[in-house]
Image (spheres, rainbow, N blue to C red):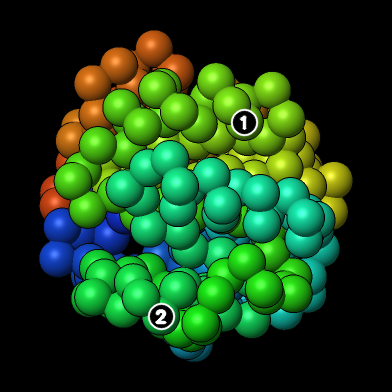
Amino acid sequence: MQNVKLIASDMDQTLLTSAGTLPPHFDRYLHRLGEAGIEFAVASGRPLYTLQETFPHFSDQISMVCDNGGLVYSHGQLIGKSLIPEEKYREIVQFIMTKTDGVPVLCALDAAYINATDAQYLPALLPFYHQLKKVPDLLTQSLAVDKVTIYFPNKDSRKNSERYFRPVFGKDYTVQVSGETWLDIQNLGVNKGRGMRILSRHFDIPTTQMMAFGDYDNDIPMLETVGYSYIMANATQGMAQHAKYRTRSNDEFGVLHVMDQVLQAQEG
């Protein structure tokens, strides 16, 4: 652990507790990491503006792999993005609305957009997309979109992925299950692993000197990219094969537990 130069963590069910809060004294850990010359990055399906609000005092001191790698932001600077062409995201939205019971969400750089007819789902969407706008028709919007998210109220995202979205879109897009109610579609090759490689080039830190934490399918590309990969004790079934190590659960502050080990190894 003496050669770790960047630590990245997923948010939900990984760094955040089940109540959706940061672990206690997290600011102290960021300070200690900075003093040790170790970069910290959050890697999340959440957009930039939501992550900035989660880290209001540190958003310009850390890196953020947002929208599962669709946008990468570091120390106040945008260093990477991958936008979906308008005609393509409209095709995806049309498919969602006609073939499934999913709720389409266009994740643009400024806000997330939903059809006004889907306003009933706002309570489920707002915790993740703090800037959420209702429009009469998503198919008429001209936006800078880096991700199309589908919310499945019936908690069957994996079933929908295998039945509909991977067969239709899997060859041309990255299709990732991000939770039992969430499915994300992005440009081919866009994922958290890509985000780690962008940060690797930006900081000139080899991926072998990076550490990452995750719990769900959309964390797999990141875990398989870095040298030190950890899954949480509460990770979903099947995740163990994609990581080298395991730590405590999110509610037992597993990320901080390993951070302590890294800092002790480097401070000692």
Tell me the element at label 1. Answer: helix
Please tell me which of labels 2 and 1 falls first in the chain: 2
User: Which kind of residue does numbered mark 2 sit on?
Assistant: Ala
- List x then y, in percent, for residue 41: 57, 57
The answer, for residue 267, to whether it is visible in the render is no
Residue 106: quarter of image: bottom right
Would you call the spot at circle 1 few (<14 residues within 10 Å), some (14-19), or many (20 or more)?
Answer: some
Tell me the element at label 2. Answer: helix
Residue 157: quarter of image: top left
Residue 116: assigned label? 2
Asked whether 73 or 203 is in front, the reply is 73
Q: Can you identify the residue that label 1 sits on?
A: 169
- List x then y, in percent, for residue 11: 38, 56
Residue 74: assigned label? none
Mark whose residue sits in front, 2 or 1: 2
For marks 2 and 1, give the CA distance.
Answer: 26 Å
